[in-house]
Amino acid sequence: MSDFLFAVLPYLAALSAIVGSIWRYRASQFSFSSVSSQFLESRQLFWGSVPWHYGIITILIGHLVGVVFPSGVKVFNGEPVRLYILEGTALALGFLLLLGLLVLIVRRSSNARLRAVTSGMDAVLLFLLLLQVGAGLGIAIYYRWGSSWYVHTATPYFWSLFKLQPQTDYVTSLPLLVKVHIVNAFVLLALFPFTRLVHMLSVPLAYLWRSYQVVVWGQRQITSRRGQ
Amino acid sequence: MDIRAQVSAVFHLDKCIGCHTCSIACKNIWTSRDGAEYMWWNNVETKPGTGYPTMWEDQRKYRGGWELNGKSLTPRLGGRLRLVSSLFHNPNLPTLDDYYEPWTYQYGVLTDAPKGEDQPTARPVSRLTGRYIDIEAGPNWDDDMSGSAVYARNDVNLEGLTLAQRASLFQVEQMAFFYIPRNCNHCLNPACVAVCPSSAPYKRAEDGIVLVNQDKCRGWRFCISGCPYKKVYYNWKTGKSEKCVLCYPRLESRQAPACFHSCVGRIRYVGLLLYDAERIGEVARAPEAVLVEAQRSLILDPRNPAVASAALRNGISQSWVDAACESPIYKWVKEWELALPLHPEFRTLPTLFYVPPLLPVVAASRDSAGGIFDMSGSGRFSDTENARLPLWYLARLFSGGNEKTVERALDKLRAVRLYKHAASFGSGGKDNALAALKMAGSTPSEAEAISRLTALPRFQDRFSLPPYQREASIEATVDPMIHKGRTGFGPNNSPRRGP
């Protein structure tokens, strides 16, 4: 069972995410976005969407840093004060995004207009995200100094996955809550192309360098021109 | 010189009867879909009034259009960094309640209701939630100044009027209003394009139509706040922005857009303008008081051989240059200087122009007791000082606050009427009329032409449509026989989103 969850599921999830995203982009670029509901309800969205997005982006970057620069994290956490600050910040961000997520869930379920634009997959996604955030916060509270033991367990596990030689030993001995967190992450990854999460792939950074006006000649050839 | 062609329009407001036929024609073709029911790509507003969506002109609320700080012209919504950092919540987005909640009626109840004591009623239900609703707003809620205490009195353009002027404006016997039909202005410096992080809205170079690429749109919603005219709409079902497409499939088969074609008052004119795209930035930065003049200077005379040859060099075909020569828009805007852009101070350089209304036709009472109208001679057409709608109000709408620009247009319109009145009925005296024409900087031959295009235009006089050579642009990219199997309306995939 744990072989399937930690040695097979990750690859299935990655396959689903990559193939699924490419398929969806090619089949229907039109659907490659999140369906914003701000037009139907704006005030509550602010208190949900802003904490959620800024929280989750920072936390995800934190997880990534642990995988990519484990030695840096080890050195950083060598000094207890820095470890406390890191753990405290991460916990605060965790609560921030939990708060955001709860606001979003309450908002979606209590407003008739929003229920009219909520799909079944949206509900599934919200549930999975709540599970993921809840598990993550549980780990942070019950199994402290995660940023330290993460680089000794999850990091080598992820690298073993990347090297196509999965070593499940790193994670099988971890507490249940951690396992739930890991497996649920793979489930979210697998579902990625089939949910509104695809909007993560359309971060419009190119806008920062684009000229203001977009002028299109003919039907295919695209040129931008400064016309501001 | 970088000459481009723009399909452009003029609405003659003195001719608009406020019948909303244009809006219905548009609704039937383009926006009778889920998520778009509340949209009116073309709508008709009563002025004074707060319009649709409510208070759309108030840029303190929506922050649409451009802001000029010294030499730098930036979207009022904010710079690029500010926009990208507010992706998760756009603080200036109008919500559905700023428009209205779309509804229908339970018509089925009228026939299916069980036998009973009472007449069955078709109650209104929301098109969004399906629940019963109390209708509290609609697309023309303040039509003909209904509810003027709430709507007309809150018109942003009344700012700057004294309390006394405002009070006199809303006395029942003094009341005056006019209609203003609005659709997308297909601006030369569109703010909706400038604020989109996904580069979904774009301007077609050949004819200047501004469109939203539905595949590229990611629903960040900035175009909706960024457009100062609130003419980009959010489809709550598909999560995409939509806007007036100037019926480009009709234009490409040389038919006028549906709202133009169906106009009962025949107030709408459409034609080509040639302009110098290189000067857009400079003109958009002109001081507020001369914005109208600056925009006029951008428009070039297609009869000028230098302009025509530069246009040909830029890939505009001879038949389009010819169409530009026939354009009624060129006459109204450039030659006669009668048609003015709506809110030029938004600095988007709109290409839809309005002939300001000369109203009311019968002048305001001159005696203080009221009730006796001066019907004789020149008094028949109110002069500027005695007009019921203050000049300041029209200047706020059509010339960035420059009363002189509006006054010149009104003076000429009035002189043309006096001239034709004298010529047709001999009333008012021909000398008077000629003097008025001279004062307004016009001539009898020009007055005849204006009168003709106002009152007796034929179909082809109002609609001077350029011949689209779609086959040429298709051939450049794909075998026409392959293309033949691909064309048609709508997306290849179902636009359905959500539950």
Image (cartoon, coloured by chain):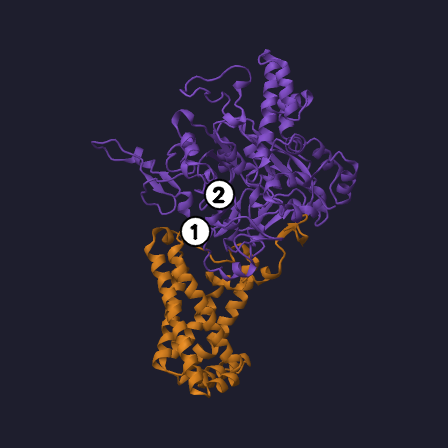
Chain colours: A orange, B purple
- In the rendered image, which quarter is residue A209 located in? bottom right
For the N terminus of chain A, the image quarter is bottom left
**Residue B25 visible within the image:** no
Q: Nearer the viewer, residue A20 or A208?
A: A208
Q: Alpha-carbon neighbours of circle 2 within 10 Å: few (<14), some, or many (≥20)?
A: many
- In the rendered image, which quarter is residue B414 located in? top right
Spot occupied by residue A28 in the image (x, y as percentages of width and height): 54, 56
Dot 1 and dot 2 within a common chain: no
Spot occupied by residue B133 in the image (x, y as percentages of width and height): 32, 42
Q: Alpha-carbon neighbours of circle 1 within 10 Å: few (<14), some, or many (≥20)?
A: many
Tag nearer the camera, 1 or 2: 2
Q: Which residue is mark 2?
A: B57
Q: Chain of mark 1?
A: A
B204 sits to left or right of B75:
right
Q: Amino acid at mark 1?
A: Phe
Give SS at disc 1. loop
Q: Amino acid at mark 2?
A: Glu
Q: Chain of mark 2?
A: B
Q: Nearer the viewer, residue B398 or B289?
A: B289
**Disc 1 + disc 2, Cβ < 8 Å:** no
Give SS at disc 2. loop
Residue A39 tag number: 1
